[in-house]
Amino acid sequence: MITLTFAEENYLKAIYHLSDGGKKGVSTNDVSAEMKTKPASVSDMLRKLGEKDVIEYRKYYGLHITEEGKKLALQTIRKHRLWEVFLVEKLKFSWDEVDEVADDLSHVKSQVLIQRLDEYLGFPKFDPHGDPIPDEYGDVRTRPRLPINDLDLGSIGQIVAVKDSSPAFLRYLDKVGAYIGARIKVMDKTEFDGSVEILVDNKKSIFMSKDVAGNILVMV
Amino acid sequence: MITLTFAEENYLKAIYHLSDGGKKGVSTNDVSAEMKTKPASVSDMLRKLGEKDVIEYRKYYGLHITEEGKKLALQTIRKHRLWEVFLVEKLKFSWDEVDEVADDLSHVKSQVLIQRLDEYLGFPKFDPHGDPIPDEYGDVRTRPRLPINDLDLGSIGQIVAVKDSSPAFLRYLDKVGAYIGARIKVMDKTEFDGSVEILVDNKKSIFMSKDVAGNILVMV
DNA sequence: TTTTATTTTTAGACAAATCTAAATCACTAA
DNA sequence: TTAGTGATTTAGATTTGTCTAAAAATAAAA
Ligand SMILES: [Mn+2]
Ligand SMILES: [Mn+2]
Ligand SMILES: [Mn+2]
Ligand SMILES: [Mn+2]
């Protein structure tokens, strides 16, 4: 049985995200930027993760996450997202405050704890940012979703997730009145700068830059 | 502002308990036994805790916890006990399963988390083992309580806490039907071996050894 | 193809927390 | 009052995770 340390677990989760769930290859510098540690530290960690067979690592050529690695990462992600649900649903945190705390909580060891928490929360399928919560076997039911950018003029959809979960971005969304579950319609698209105007819940109109529109994911 | 590492926090909590809340002096071997680490490791840690002024440490003569140390220990204890309440009240853990998990949870950094948790739990005053939960300023309202041993024959009282919180002892109490809040009456005391017979809730009679009786605390 | 720039790894150091083995101190029992 | 025992500390090693500085490898440009 593979056991990971606290830090290895963190790296693996970051690698999973950078891998886009296992498709893309990932470089040392990618991981360094994501983890905010120096490339030298990353090299060392990659060697260890390679030895534990959770990634396939070739010196100077980056890494690929393995099936085993994916499974373990998904367990950590499951815990993280369940705690995020707990913090928002039960403790009334706002969605921009939960990530850091959930990161801490998700390192608590007990299996039973997570089972009971899941049950207590009513087996939620998505976290406060719209990201799917893997089940205890690591299965994750993805739903097709695309950035507002990719919608045609006049098309309608529903906001189901955000790509960027940084507090700054989430607070911006709060301010303009965008939220997970909101029904939207694309009212205008500006070719020149990629900005978009959408109508939320048939009531409120929001202008947003290309950058913002690219970070809001909708289901059509 | 004094900041303690994960391990220092654990040691300080153990020291607080061994100090009986600050009265008694504590030896290196005491701490070693409590923490299940070697005396050599303890010596090193005591030096560090001494440098941080959370204990007063004289080589070869043991230690005393300082006021500052008490405050910090009580913060950790507060977190620990609030999490224990959460696990029992909300996640349906039994009282013999919570200590280890609560130990992990109580190292999560966020202040806000603990405030919100406290609020969510309805500002509980006691944990599942009957121990008082310090408030955010470290104030702890103690109530007079004494071991069943010290009760006279025929006297009545109410179980308010246990001195030993080990799973083995707690499961024993479950088995014989003793619990926090139970009303008891001392029916018999045997001088010879210190064993006691009590009547629980005017219904169930329990025989217990001196050892057991000494670990059940009652309010008269 | 050769040079240059960028990325990545190695080497060496450090802090934290632990251990074992050896040395030292303090108390106690002759 | 001193020898011996037990408690405690020191010395030195190990693991984990991080860093800086320097070396090496790859990728890009000339
Ligand atoms: Mn998160
Ligand atoms: Mn999330
Ligand atoms: Mn406890
Ligand atoms: Mn307790």
Image: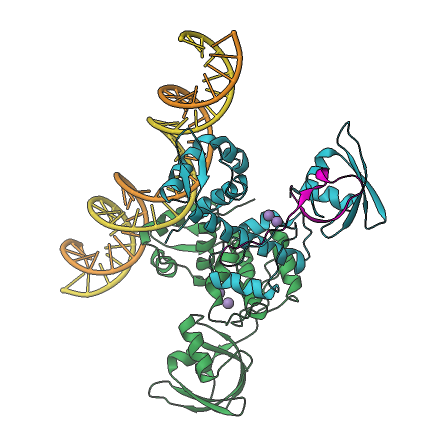
Chain colours: A cyan, B green, C yellow, D orange
In this rendering, the answer to whether A145 lies above or below B95 is above
**Quadrant of residue A64 in the image?**
top left
**Quadrant of residue B92 in the image?**
bottom right
In this rendering, the answer to whether B85 lies above or below B59 is below
From the viewer's perspective, is A101 left or right of D26? right
Residue plotted at (50% across, 61% down): B102
From the viewer's perspective, is C13 left or right of A106? left
* Residue B67 drawn at (x, y percent): 53, 54
In this rendering, the answer to whether C27 lies above or below D28 is below
Q: Is residue B107 visible?
A: yes
Chain part drawn in magenta: A136-163
From the viewer's perspective, is A12 left or right of B39? right
Q: Nearer the viewer, residue A23 or B89?
A: A23
Q: Nearer the viewer, residue A7 or B188?
A: A7
Residue A159 belongs to magenta span: yes
* Residue A7 drawn at (x, y percent): 46, 44
